[in-house]
Amino acid sequence: MEKSLPLHLLHAKNFTIIINRSHAILHFIAILFLLHYRLSPFFFQGAGTSTTVPATLPWLLIFASELLLSLSWLMSRSFHWRPVNRTVFPERLPPDGELPAIDVFVCTADPNKEPTVEVMNTVISAMTLDYPPEKLHVYVSDDAGSDATLRCTKEAWNFATCWVPFCRRYGIGTGCPDVYFSSSGDDHGEFKGSEFKAEREKMEKKYEVLTQRLRTIVQDRDVALSSNARDHSSMIEVINEYPREEMQEDEVKMPLLVYVSREKRPSHHHNFKAGALNVLLRVSATMSNSPYILVLDCDMYCNDPASARQAMCYYCDPQTSPSIAFVQFPQTFWNVRENDIYDGQLRSTFKIYWPGIDGVEGPFLSGTNYYIKREALMGNFRKQEDLRALKRSFGPSNDFIKTLVEDHKPNFINDGESSRMLLEKAKVLASCSYENQTTWGSKVGFMYFCVLEDYFTGFTLHRKGWKSVYLDPKRPQFLGTGTTNFNDMSVQWTRWMSGLVSVAISRCCPLIYGPVKMSLVQLMCYSELAFQPLLHCLSLWGFALIPQLCLFNAIHLYPKVSDPNFNIFLIIFVSAISKSLYEIVVVTGGELRTWRNEWRIWMMKSVTCYTYGSLDAVLNKLGVTEASFLPTNKVTDDEQVMLYEKGVFDFRAAPMFVAPMVTVILVNIAAFVGAFVRVLVGDGGDGYLEKMAGQMFLSLYILVSNYAVIEGMVLRKDKASIPLSVTFLSAVFSVFFLLIGSYVLC
Ligand SMILES: O=c1ccn([C@@H]2O[C@H](COP(=O)(O)OP(=O)(O)O[C@H]3O[C@H](CO)[C@@H](O)[C@H](O)[C@H]3O)[C@@H](O)[C@H]2O)c(=O)[nH]1
Ligand SMILES: [Mn+2]
């Protein structure tokens, strides 16, 4: 009977669905009223309307801001359309012998920003996944081609030969040694007996030796090597072949571990992470050719060994498997705190948006923590005979083509000789010219079209009709390093926003390129995200400056408080705030300050990262600049961590990320203080306060929300406060805005 029991279940969150949809309707009606209010003076003049336009240009500009934000809001309703939950039953999976094999890809690119000890912890943790070891193959992609990383991988392997059996024997729940030994967590039970305790101590010592060795290797590494990160030949090594330092008495099977560093030459574009992943796709095909692939960023360690079996609950179900391209787990971060001032945890993405579209065609591909089907990336060519066509598409390697046409079984035998031959062939596959005149990155594999390879590859898959699944079990399956300082966050978000806008303004814009096999809801999701940076930065710049410049010049843009139309704005404001409070507090069990943090950082990002990202994408499109992928810094700095943990902003970021915020704050201060003085002195004339209340409130709201900036500018004197030079520069900008703005607008 066991067989008939489902491997997985889907539950719609009915209550949230009702709330979401009713709120959407009410909010939408309020927006219609707003449209009517803004347009009526132009269309219904004289027909009993009480609205008059004080100044046409600012009126139109603020209306445009309202429209853009409303448009984004409207499209984003698709993310709230049908939130669901999923449950899986891995205990009902077929026996181990029948499980499909998995290749794990771990990508690293820069040993200076990605500490090798952490990368190795990720690699080791992947080897401890609860899966038959002969069906698990771990590939480390080193884009820096660093000899130190190769040597460290060998050391990690040596350690893993003891660590993996230890974890399996004692059912250790945390396969990442660093985390296991540094936490006083669940696995250290006395109940496991004295033998366990002794073993554990032994392992701990071994781990200390490992970290020591890794550090020495990293310290000794040839300094000249860093200059070779962009210019080096390919290197592939099967680490399992190295003689172990000490043989285990009860030899336990180990997963395959392969180090891959693709060839890189300055003359060839390396296509960043997508390029690295495509090399791994080819190399792994000739070695293990597993039908499923787990992709991990180098800092995303497996926090729990269960994810592979959880994902297999979908792939082992003949009903769902044929349509699913990937099973996505959320990105979760070990270093984010409750008071997450930079919203490094990406709460709304992984707790609201992804469950929201999971009920439609599934979540977006999110860079890491997903089990993807090889066939979805490569296509199905099992009975294809036209070799020439295949070679045109996939490149000249017969060995690789063979893996596509035949129902290929892994042909890697760990005997030295055949592996040597295979490695020679694999090296060809990792050369930088291999993809010349092929469709790698444009039709097959991971897509090169934009630096956000995950978004665009997922989009292409959904567009072809594939579906995806979102699994968010209680215990985080993967944990990574989130950004916890202003500079790293800004750099990362600028890249993401640039990637999104580059899609939005291209021929692949979801609005025109999407509608093949995607539902309208899914299409709206992809479009909303692609256009979000543009829509939000334009509208937020509008909200941050237009009403204030008008306030400064005593021009009112909102209805009088006594005017019934004032309620439209009040309702929209309250409705937006209460919906996000509902999501944060009720749906995700957050706190009030989470709400404050998210709204504040959203305003800050809109005038910086969203703006720069959009600009960058436009400049790339015009050919003025080139797309780039600066890997996010994963080195933690104690001082920065301390500030973050105290909830204090670290403004030691590039001035370009700080100055726009300070400028906005200064303009708002000028406008608000000016208006306030007018009220006090009674200089504004009759009904001034009533007319200006909306704008004064907006300014005050911006100032109160961003009090942290004022504090960093005026009150704080520490190293991480806003430097005087930046404040001065921003003061010049704000005077410029006030003068030019007043001249142009009024
Ligand atoms: O040329 C490159 C650049 C990056 N990477 C690797 O890609 C991963 C992600 O890079 P990271 O610097 O951590 O970027 P994040 O912004 O933190 O990553 C998010 O955004 C990326 C897209 O911009 C996705 O690829 C990631 O999976 C997603 O976690 C890391 O393991 C890097 O080592 C490469 O292998 N080659
Ligand atoms: Mn990252």
Image (cartoon, rainbow, N blue to C red):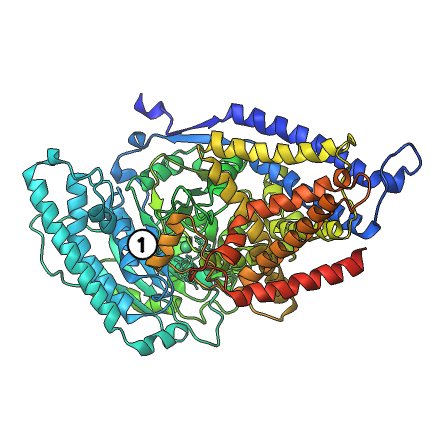
Q: Which residue is mark 1?
A: 288
Q: Tell me, yes or no, if residue 318 can be seen here.
A: yes
Residue 466 spot, x, y in % from top left: 51, 42
Between residue 85 and residue 417, name the one nearer to us: 85
Q: Is residue 235 left or right of residue 186?
A: right
Residue 452 spot, x, y in % from top left: 51, 56
Between residue 108 and residue 543, name the one nearer to us: 543
Between residue 67 and residue 651, name the one nearer to us: 651
Image quarter in which the C terminus is found: bottom right
Q: Which residue reaches farthest right?
A: 46
Using the image, determine if residue 263 lies above or below residue 518.
Answer: below
Q: Which residue reaches farthest top?
A: 1
Residue 132 spot, x, y in % from top left: 24, 43
Where disc 1 sits, the SS reads loop
Task: Give the quadrant of ligand 1.
Answer: bottom left
Image quarter in which the N terminus is found: top left
Specify the quadrant of the image occupied by residue 231. Answer: bottom left
Characterize the local packing of mark 1: few (<14), some (14-19) or many (20 or more) Cα atoms within 10 angstroms: many
Q: How many marks?
A: 1
Q: Indicate the amino acid at tag 1.
A: Ser
Using the image, determine if residue 521 lies above or below residue 435.
Answer: above
User: Within 8 Å: ligand 1 and the Cβ of disc 1?
Assistant: no
Q: Residue drawn 44% across and 57% down?
A: 650
Residue 411 spot, x, y in % from top left: 28, 56
Between residue 5 and residue 718, name the one nearer to us: 718
Q: Which residue reaches farthest bottom?
A: 224
Q: Tell me, yes or no, if residue 380 can be seen here.
A: no
Q: Residue drawn 74% across and 40% down?
A: 689
